[in-house]
Amino acid sequence: MEHIVIIGNGIAGITAARHIRKLSDKKVTIISAETDHFFSRTALMYVYMGHMRWRDIEPYESWFWKKNRLELKKAYVETVDTNNKTLHFKEGGSITYDKLIIATGSTTNTFGWEGLELNGVQGLVSKQDLENLEKNAPNNKECPRAVIVGGGLIGVEMAEMLRTRKIEVTMLVRESAFWAGTLPKPEAEMISSHVISHGVDLRHNAELDKILGDDKGNVRAIVTKDGEEIPCCVVGITTGVKPQISFLKNSKIETDKGILVNRKLETNIENVYAIGDCAQQREPIGNRPPIEAVWYTGRMMGEALAQTICGKPFEYNPGNWFNSAKFFDIEYQTYGWVFSESKLKDYEAQFHWKCASDLRCVTISCNKNSNEFLGINTFGIRMKHEVFDKWLNEKRSVDYVIENLKQANFDPEFFKNYEKEIQTAYANQTISV
């Protein structure tokens, strides 16, 4: 029986395993050093905040794995010998495979700051990170103040988590507004105001210089590049993530920032594949970055690769870009492409609308030459994915999208609708270029 070994039990690896089982009777072994069972990584924050228990973020019951003949092994893969199709474990022992799927995800990205080794310095990616935060910041007596380095989605999650325990939070963001490298300026400024309204000491144009420790090896403060010393007990590093591939350093598998793959998710080594956050497309797909650390793309890669593994070669095709997140009370959705000021394309023009409450806004992007709708960002207003996906595929005009916004509204019937306000503003506003 062909033996499929999967390193990593995140969304990409588990999706591949589930679909291989649906399509075949192959032997499947899943290896992870992080946890015994798959869990919903995007729900880590809710465990710390007391909204969910750990078992609530495990989508499958413990009996699921045996029933579906998916063997689980808790171990850390130290080396990969592709000549002999063998994995060697840090704890000792080894396992052989016929086909190998690497789905090891990502880890916190750091930039060589002094003091990274101190107790209290951590990211927010893994179960171990959650456990460390519980230990490092159990309450505001043991941890009166924390500093978060970097903004983005992980940074704002950590800030919200800590504020639920009334811990003072200072956040260092090197841009002039929150996540301004990704969001158009009006949106970034709105989110900055919203984060500050939740009691976060948000510092714009601020960067970390070094982390200071006490004589017991614990964090006591950070120093900014402007020379300011800020006392704290925890330093959250949320300056992005990078593929977790250090164990491949001496293997024959080609890597760059991630594991290099083609559209079939094949590496340079026959019968070795990579999916999820650790995979890097040799040729980027459209405007997408070559590495996508996004939950749904990991799931899609797992589904696509299962077809190939089971004899039906299938290319990964993620379709139109979309994503969603939450900034404290403001829900965010994006469909298609809406670029920030620094990344704006030559052909791109944008229309911005913001509610008087400063809690809702919409940015719509179009091709200024053809008027083709390119993408939309919504904050505080829920929209339907399938509608925008259809309009993007149909290459609808921005005028059509504005006129038919009601079709895309997803908010419950008792919520206020803003389509007319948006349409009026569009009629009276020149699209910015």
Image: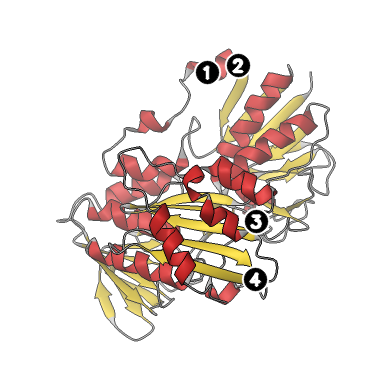
Measure the alpha-carbon separation of dots 1 and 4: 52 Å
Q: Which mark is residue 68?
A: 2
Measure the alpha-carbon separation of dots 3 and 2: 31 Å
Q: Residue at x 62, y 53 (%)?
A: 292
Q: Position of residue 284 (x, y in %)?
A: 73, 58
Eye-nearest disc, 1 or 4: 4
Q: Of the residues shown, which amino acid type is indicated by label 4?
A: Lys
Which label's residue is closer to the chain start, 3 or 4?
3
| SS class, disc 2 | loop
| SS class, disc 4 | loop
Q: Which mark is residue 64?
A: 1
Task: Name the residue nearer the viewer: 57 or 389.
Answer: 389
Which label's residue is closer to the chain start, 1 or 3?
1
CB within 8 Å, label 3 to label 2: no
Q: Is residue 104 visible?
A: no
In the displayed structure image, the side of residue 159 where residue 34 appears, left or right: right
Q: Of the residues shown, which amino acid type is indicated by label 3?
A: Ile
Q: Considering only vertical position in the picture, is 311 above or below 118? A: above
Which label's residue is closer to the chain start, 4 or 2?
2
CB within 8 Å, label 4 to label 2: no
Q: Position of residue 309 (x, y in %)?
A: 78, 31
Task: Name the residue nearer the viewer: 260 or 327.
Answer: 327
Residue identified by numbered label 4: 368
